[in-house]
Amino acid sequence: DAGVTQSPTHLIKTRGQQVTLRCSPKSGHDTVSWYQQALGQGPQFIFQYYEEEERQRGNFPDRFSGHQFPNYSSELNVNALLLGDSALYLCASSLKQGVYNEQFFGPGTRLTVL
Amino acid sequence: GQQLNQSPQSMFIQEGEDVSMNCTSSSIFNTWLWYKQDPGEGPVLLIALYKAGELTSNGRLTAQFGITRKDSFLNISASIPSDVGIYFCAGRSGSARQLTFGSGTQLTVLP
């Protein structure tokens, strides 16, 4: 049973560029959430996708956008990269229905913006 | 964004000792979670708490959901070297599915 997978593992971009990160949820899960984790901090919620739509969003600008595909996989896109976007980006999957369906995290994508 | 107040920030303990860490919030949560994160990995769920006052164990780990619903603690008994890592508390409120995380407790276990 594959867990949550993310690609790429590491990425280096320059300011102003755009980046796309990818996530495949754990088998059987239908909901994907994205988090940004700055060095030395806890993860911060970006947004959550279910049924191919953004359902909840944290305090992140519109430069951060996403997509969910019919197979439940998801992409996170960040436009006009800033130095402050350098962080570990975590994807978490869960089941939409049920109170006790907790989020399982992938290993993350380390983004460095120069 | 909002973060929970987690303490201590870091701990250095001897192997075999017990350790305790806690998390407080100004807001009420209806779910408290404890995760462990190793270098280069994503957080791994250790314990989930769903009712105020609930005390739950997972091996040498014990966590409690505070009766005010604004705090939680995690205890690790008889620490071992593989306990090294960063421990995060996380809360979920109302019907929200998003998690709010603490800033983490870095645990170092000395031989």
Image: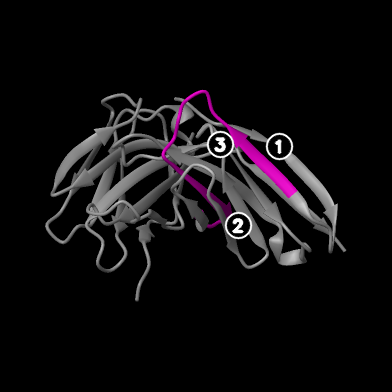
Q: Is residue B32 magenta?
A: yes
Of circles 3 and 2, the one toward us is 3
The answer to which of A27 and A17 lies nearer the viewer is A27
Q: Residues within 10 Å of mark 1 (few under 14, many from 20)?
A: some
Secondary structure under badge 2? loop
Picture coordinates of residue B85, whole percent (x, y): 67, 54
Q: Residues within 10 Å of mark 2 (few under 14, many from 20)?
A: some
Q: Which residue is mark 2?
A: B38
Name the kind of residue labelled 3 in the image: Gly
Q: Earlier in the sequence, mark 1 or mark 2?
A: 1
Q: What subunit carries mark 2? A: B
Q: In the rendered image, which quarter is residue B78 located in?
A: bottom right
Callouts 1 and 2 close, C-beta under 8 Å: no
Which span is picked out in magenta?
A: B20-43
Q: Which residue is mark 1?
A: B9
Quarter containing the N terminus of chain A: bottom left
Callouts 3 and 1 close, C-beta under 8 Å: no
Q: Earlier in the sequence, mark 3 or mark 1?
A: 1
Of circles 1 and 2, the one toward us is 1
Secondary structure under badge 1? loop
Q: Residue at x 47, y 25 (%)?
A: B27
Q: In the rendered image, which quarter is residue B22 located in?
A: top right
The answer to which of B21 and A27 lies nearer the viewer is B21
- The disc placed on residue B102 is 3
- The disc placed on residue B88 is none
